[in-house]
Amino acid sequence: MMSILRKLPNPAGERNKDPILSVLKRFLNKMKPNLQLLEISSGVGLHSSYFAPHFPNITFQTSEYDTTLFGSIQAYQKDAGSVNVLPPIFIDISAPLADWENDANIEQSSSTARFDYMLNINMLHISPLECAIGLFKNAGLLLKPDGLLITYGPYAVDGVLVPESNVRFDKSLQERDDRWGIRDTSVLKKLADRNGITLEEMIDLPANNKCLIWKKRT
């Protein structure tokens, strides 16, 4: 059944798109041609379609676990008119790379890593820990040496979660689903290290969120 192309609203995304873009402008290469970025959990599709015109040398591959959102992702792409954003593909980030099946034929061995960048916005705290495990495991396979994984959202830092609004938010997430919750950077750093990835920088952004810049080691 064909997805209906209709843009779904994303108020949080409208608020955070420019702060995140300012970070991307610092870390994404705007000169080298034919770079590849994989967005994990594209949601309704706002972000890649907003970012892509600023990086015409980078092809943005969108993806989503919830296939009912494909129509919205494509509607944002159509409205933006960005030729460097690819249609969404289904990815279950918690699954091993060898088990992936999608239109882009991404599944491959670590010796054929193909992405210069991966981007993941507001997923880690509203998904089971298995998704965080899978994100770093698959990033370790998919990223080229020195490739970047950029994640955005609320985080606890070495066991400390502030401010109080984030503490309340974390509690509300766990009440909705006890597998959810704001992740601690100390836990994520261990997951990353197991997969040859290092936390390079942590950037504070509005609304008590952060961008974490992770690099695949050579």
Image (cartoon, helix red, strand yellow):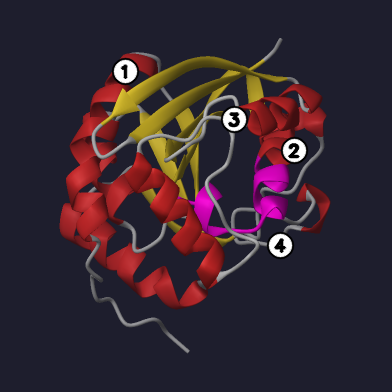
Question: Which quadrant of the view contains residue 44?
Answer: bottom left
Q: Which residue is mark 2?
A: 137
Image point (52%, 46%), residue name: 182
Which residue type does callout 2 highlight? Lys
- Mark toward the start of the polypeptide (4 vs 1): 1
Q: Which mark is residue 30?
A: 1
In three-dimensional space, the C-alpha distance between marks 4 and 1, rounded to whole angstroms, equals 31 Å
Q: Residues within 10 Å of mark 4 (few under 14, many from 20)?
A: some
Q: Main secondary structure of the magenta part?
A: helix
In three-dimensional space, the C-alpha distance between marks 2 and 3, rounded to whole angstroms, equals 23 Å
- Mark toward the start of the polypeptide (4 vs 3): 4
Q: Residues within 10 Å of mark 2 (few under 14, many from 20)?
A: many
- Does the residue at mark 4 contact the one at mark 2 (Cβ under 8 Å)? no
Where residue 95 appears, as percent x and y from the top left, is 75, 56
Where residue 68 appears, as percent x and y from the top left, is 45, 78
Helix, strand or loop status at disc 4: loop
Helix, strand or loop status at disc 2: helix
Q: Which residue is mark 3?
A: 159
Q: Which residue is mark 4?
A: 101
Q: Nearer the viewer, residue 186 or 6?
A: 186
